[in-house]
Amino acid sequence: MPADILMNYPDSHCSSYYAATSNETLEYPPLRTDVRTDVCVIGAGFTGIATALTLAERGYSVTVLEQNKVGWGASGRSGGQMIGGLPGDASLKKRWGDTHADTVFELGYRGHAIIAQRVQRDGIDCDLKYGYIDVALRPLHLE
Ligand SMILES: Cc1cc2nc3c(=O)[nH]c(=O)nc-3n(C[C@H](O)[C@H](O)[C@H](O)COP(=O)(O)OP(=O)(O)OC[C@H]3O[C@@H](n4cnc5c(N)ncnc54)[C@H](O)[C@@H]3O)c2cc1C
């Protein structure tokens, strides 16, 4: 593990398909001593872990502080789908124009590429699959 992960008090993940089919369960020690580190990341969800991993890959010493468990928050409750689009992209375009909105949109796809690279490079056995469907919940959505 490239970064140290310290937790105040471990708790269990919410019940989900991912929790039930997880390949391994990792437990990390509570923080009980002073720690010197280049960067301290608070929160071990997608954002914190991706930040910590990226910094550690660039040679920084990184400590992640998580109050529950890795992936305990929204990241452990998500559908786990790598899909395009952002909520509110229409208002983003309206407010900031096409160029800025397109940049933000493209960032989402760069994120997909980073996930795919890491899964391949680190041999992560996560059953990565591509493809999704957009469903219409109301007749209006068909438009
Ligand atoms: C039901 C649901 C379905 C979703 N489906 C998808 C999907 O299919 N695809 C997709 O791309 N996105 C999906 N999302 C959105 C996605 O899950 C979130 O955008 C993403 O997980 C956010 O990650 P995060 O690291 O920013 O936050 P979180 O995962 O919430 O991580 C924050 C972490 O910080 C910890 N923390 C907070 N405060 C402190 C503190 N003071 N000290 C220490 N630790 C602290 C929390 O315990 C938590 O673990 C879904 C979200 C939900 C809720």
Image (cartoon, grey):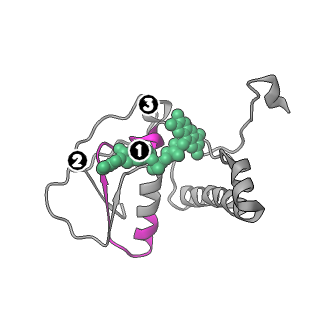
**Circle nearer the N terminus (3, 2):** 2
Query: Could you say which disc has been placed on residue 11 in the image?
Result: none
Circle 3 crowding by C-alpha within 10 Å: few under 14, some 14–19, many from 20: few
Residue located farthest toward the top when viewing the structure as drawn = 138
Q: Position of residue 97 (x, y in %)?
A: 75, 61
Q: Which residues are magenta?
A: 53-76
Residue located farthest toward the front when viewing the structure as drawn = 95
Specify whether tag 2 is near ligand 1 (CB below 8 Å). Answer: yes
Q: Is residue 52 left or right of residue 129?
A: left
Which image quadrant for residue 101?
bottom right
Which image quadrant for residue 68?
top left
Give SS at disc 1: loop
Q: Is residue 55 magenta?
A: yes
Q: CA distance from mark 3 to mark 1?
A: 14 Å
Residue located farthest toward the left when viewing the structure as drawn = 33
Q: Is residue 102 magenta?
A: no
* Amino acid type shown at disc 2: Asn
Query: Could you say which disc has been placed on residue 8 in the image?
Result: 2
Q: Is residue 58 left or right of residue 99?
A: left
* Amino acid type shown at disc 3: Ala
Query: Could you say which disc has been placed on residue 20 in the image?
Result: 3
Specify whether tag 1 is near ligand 1 (CB below 8 Å). Answer: yes
**Circle nearer the N terminus (3, 1):** 3
* Amino acid type shown at disc 1: Gly
- Taking depth in this image into account, of 35 and 102 the one nearest to the observer is 102
